[in-house]
Image (cartoon, helix red, strand yellow):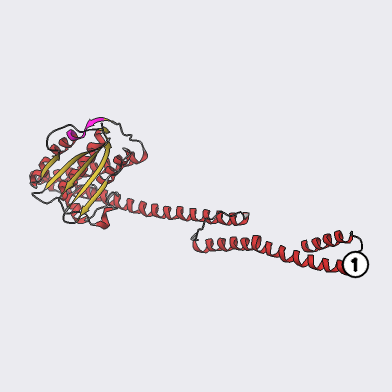
Amino acid sequence: MLAVLIALITTAFLSLMPNVELKALGVTAIISFASAFILIYISLQFLIFREINNIYKNIDRIKKNSFKVPVKLKRSANPLRRVNEDILAYADKKQREIEELKELEIFRREFIADVSHELKTPLFAAQGFVLTLLDGAMDDEAVRYKFLRKAAKSLDGLNILVQDLLTLSQIESGHISMKKETFDIRAVTEEVFDQLEENAFEKEIELSIEPTEYEPVFVKGDAMRIAQVMTNLIGNAVKYSPESSVINVKFLIKQDMIQTTVVDNGTGIPPEHIKRIFERFYRVDKSRSKKQGGTGLGLAIVKHIIEKHGSEILVKSKVGSGTSFKFLLPKG
């Protein structure tokens, strides 16, 4: 229709000229019609119909493959091509959202399973001791004291687990803010050494600080939370270090920052586990970790506390040679 209109307009315009033969008008009408038809057809085909077909193809692929489409975001002047690119970009965005939701769902299931397992162990232990006492063991004073002590120990472990879960949840949700102040991190470390001295003495582990000469190391941060970080890091080092080994805490000044490093020469962490050790309840050696105790939340808490201080915790480990954890805090 467009080609016919163009041919009629061209012929009518040419007929207004004097001494124009009818044959010339016919030839003009045919040539203008043919050229207009070909140009319009090619324009519609390449600028509109092909892009519409591509849109339908991509929509069909999205329906069949759950948004899995190749995305080539090259902006074009063609509005239909831009629509096609926007559909692809939207599909890619939704695909990534779906993958994140799937990962979160897997994480949620694993977390619920881990929490259930961790809560079940001390609860069942305490329940077993109490039921045994109720079944008649209470009459024996020695047995009664022994079982009550074991039940209390199980409940203490349950309380620690609940407190760690609550702390982690509050940090993640932002309900706990870091109260930053200037404090001596070396003094905090020595207090942690005092708390863990008995455990280290049993394994003949030496706890040391560098530099060896006492000099305050002032940093800016939440003293109580950083003490929690040092307790977890040094406590883990004591748990997983062999007898007669050394655990060293080093302080290094880097311009306006203080780098704190906790180094042990323990069993080390295999490379495939390093990326996951900060996950909740993740244990490198599940059987050994259970024997050593702990809630499996220590390093997750450490990671969140350090991140709330605007820093990150880095780990370097080699199987059989030991592990080092380090983080930076602003100089006080």
Relative to the observer, which residue lies in front, 256 or 265? 256
Residue 89 in percent (x, y) is at: 52, 54
* Residue 190 position by quadrant: top left
Q: Is residue 325 magenta?
A: no
Position of 267 with respect to 274 (left or right) is left
Figure quadrant of the N terminus: bottom right
Residue type pointed to by label 1? Glu
Count neighbours of disc 1 (C-alpha within 10 A) and say few if under 14, some if 14 to 19, many if 20 or more.
Answer: few
Residue 301 in percent (x, y) is at: 28, 43
Q: Would residue 161 be visible to someone looking at this image?
A: yes
Position of 21 with respect to 190 (left or right) is right
The stretch of residues the image draws in magenta is 182-187
User: Is residue 17 placed above or below 159 in the rendered structure?
Assistant: below
User: Is residue 5 placed above or below 310 in the rendered structure?
Assistant: below
Give me the residue at 15% from left, 51% from top: 266
- Which residue bears the numbered disc 1? 21
Relative to the observer, which residue lies in front, 320 or 30? 30
Residue 155 in percent (x, y) is at: 21, 43
* Outermost residue, front side: 19
Relative to the observer, which residue lies in front, 157 or 274? 274
Q: Would residue 145 be visible to someone looking at this image?
A: no
Q: Circle 1 — which element?
A: loop
Give me the residue at 22% from left, 48% from top: 122
* Outermost residue, right side: 19
Relative to the observer, which residue lies in front, 246 or 284? 246
